[in-house]
Amino acid sequence: MPLNREFILSATKNLLFALFVSSLTSSKNHFHRSFIFRPPTKLDKKPEHRFFVVTEWMNEWADATSILSDHVMNDKIRYEETITDGFENAPQALRDVLTGKNFGKQIIKI
């Protein structure tokens, strides 16, 4: 199956849904009860949302990696990372990861 618009939209929807669910579970004491996630009880049709399973798309891995790396090289996709200097600051860097103070990848420069 070639990498196409439908695949990218599906993967994006799945990622956003996973982020939404994880944000609900990470702040479970800070949101109104009406926002509690309830999985569907009846699966007569294909679920509208499902999690993205990487192994389902292993045959597309090389194509996707090539496309994404081209986008990064051409500044169509940008990434950010948090860099912490010194191994002695590693404990604080880990606390930052666990509390969400970092952005992107957490890197410790030794």
Image: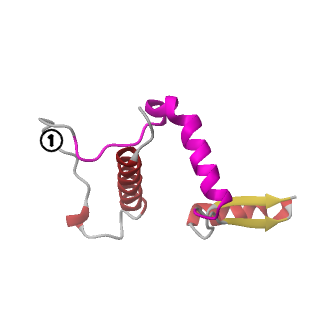
Q: Nearer the viewer, residue 7 or 18?
A: 7
**Crowd around label 1: few <14 · some 14–19 · many ≥20 (10 Å):** few
Q: Is residue 4 left or right of residue 37?
A: right
**Where 63 sits versus 84, above or below?**
above
Q: Look at the image and give the residue range highlighted in magenta.
A: 47-76
Q: Quadrant of residue 98?
A: bottom right
Quadrant in which the C terminus is drawn: bottom right
- Give how far across and how far down residue 95 sits, in percent: 65, 63
Q: Quadrant of residue 64?
A: top right
What kind of colouring is applied to the model shown? secondary structure
Which residue is located at x 39 percent, y 57 percent?
Answer: 16
**Where 65 sits versus 12, above or below?**
above
Residue under numbered circle 1: 41
Which residue is located at x 69 percent, y 60 percent?
Answer: 106
- Give how far across and how far down residue 90 sits, in percent: 77, 60
Q: Is residue 3 left or right of residue 93?
A: left
Label 1 sits on a secondary structure element that is loop
**Where 5 sits versus 24, above or below?**
above
Q: Quadrant of residue 87?
A: bottom right
Q: Nearer the viewer, residue 38 or 103?
A: 103
- Give how far across and how far down residue 8 sits, in percent: 41, 49
Does the segment drawn in magenta span residue 55? yes
Of the residues shown, which amino acid type is indicated by label 1?
Thr
